[in-house]
Amino acid sequence: MVLQDHFHPPLSLRRHWHSFYNTWATYIASDLNSKLPEDYFAEINVQFKKKPVIQTVEINIFNTQGGAVLAGAIELVSPANKDRASHRQAFVSKCKTLLRQGIGLVIIDVVTERKANLHDELLNRITEGASYLGAELYATYYRVIERDGQPSIDIWQEKISIGDTLPTVPFWLRGNNCLPLELDSIYKRTCQEQRIYVKSA
């Protein structure tokens, strides 16, 4: 299933992107729950508010040993995350805080109506001499590890484009568990359930 443009006509006139995102996040969590060890679980946090503007679409993975402790997070970038400097800064600050806590992080951006690159802005905040992606759409993963007793971040980055299939992302959780995040199959399932077909786009 190739990635479609959910933010421009004709598809944006036929389907609401926020409904698609809600369903997409649900199926990502469902897929992860079928793969996670017994002491982990995934759940979604989706918030859409107009005043104040809040657009949060994320999947959080928790380790239940000693309570529900956050081990990983997947952020689906929304239009509001990219539309002004204060929103971009808030998103980047949230991601930076997650990485400071050693939490595995994935950012997925398929928003075509805004041009900001939140991955590159995050790199500006957390690394020196980083290799920037420079892409409008992407999927990226960040893993916090120790090298020679010092914290370090492994970064996996993949450009994506409308009309291409989505990649499988390696998703390392805090605690050294790694799962394949199979975005293509999950996206296909979401489109099928929402009756979104290639001929609709």
Image (tube, grey):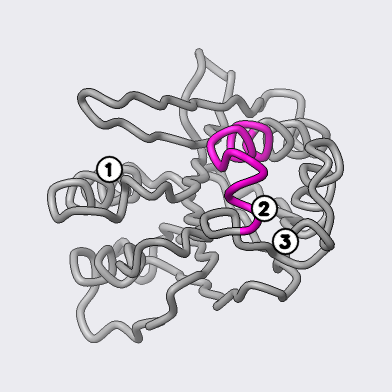
Residue, x 63% and y 29% (percent of image)?
42
Tell me if residue 45 is in the magenta stretch: no
Q: Nearer the viewer, residue 156 or 46?
A: 46
Q: Residue 178 — which label? A: 2
Disc 3 is placed on an element classified as loop
Residue type marked 3 = Ala
Alpha carbons under labels 2 and 1: distance apart: 22 Å
Q: Amino acid at mark 1?
A: Lys
Residue 142 x, y percent position in the rendering: 45, 61
Residue at disc 2, secondary structure: strand
Q: Residues within 10 Å of mark 1 (few under 14, many from 20)?
A: few
The magenta-colored residue range is: 10-25
User: Would you name the residue on which mark 3 appears?
Assistant: 201
The label shown at residue 5 is none
Spot occupied by residue 41 in the image (x, y as percentages of width and height):
66, 25
Image depth: mark 2 or mark 1 in front: 1
First of labels 2, 1 by sequence position: 1
Q: Position of residue 109 (x, y in %)?
A: 49, 59
N-terminal of the two: label 1 or label 3? 1
Circle 1/circle 3 CB separation < 8 Å: no
Calculate the distance from the C-alpha at mark 3 to the C-alpha at mark 2. 34 Å
Indicate the quadrant where residue 6 lies.
bottom right
Main SS of the magenta part reads helix
Q: Quadrant of the C terminus?
A: bottom right
In this rendering, position of residue 124 left or right of residue 190: left
| Residue sitting at x 50%, y 65% | 140
Residue 40 appears in which quarter of the rendering? top right
Q: Give the camera-side residue of 10 and 186.
A: 10
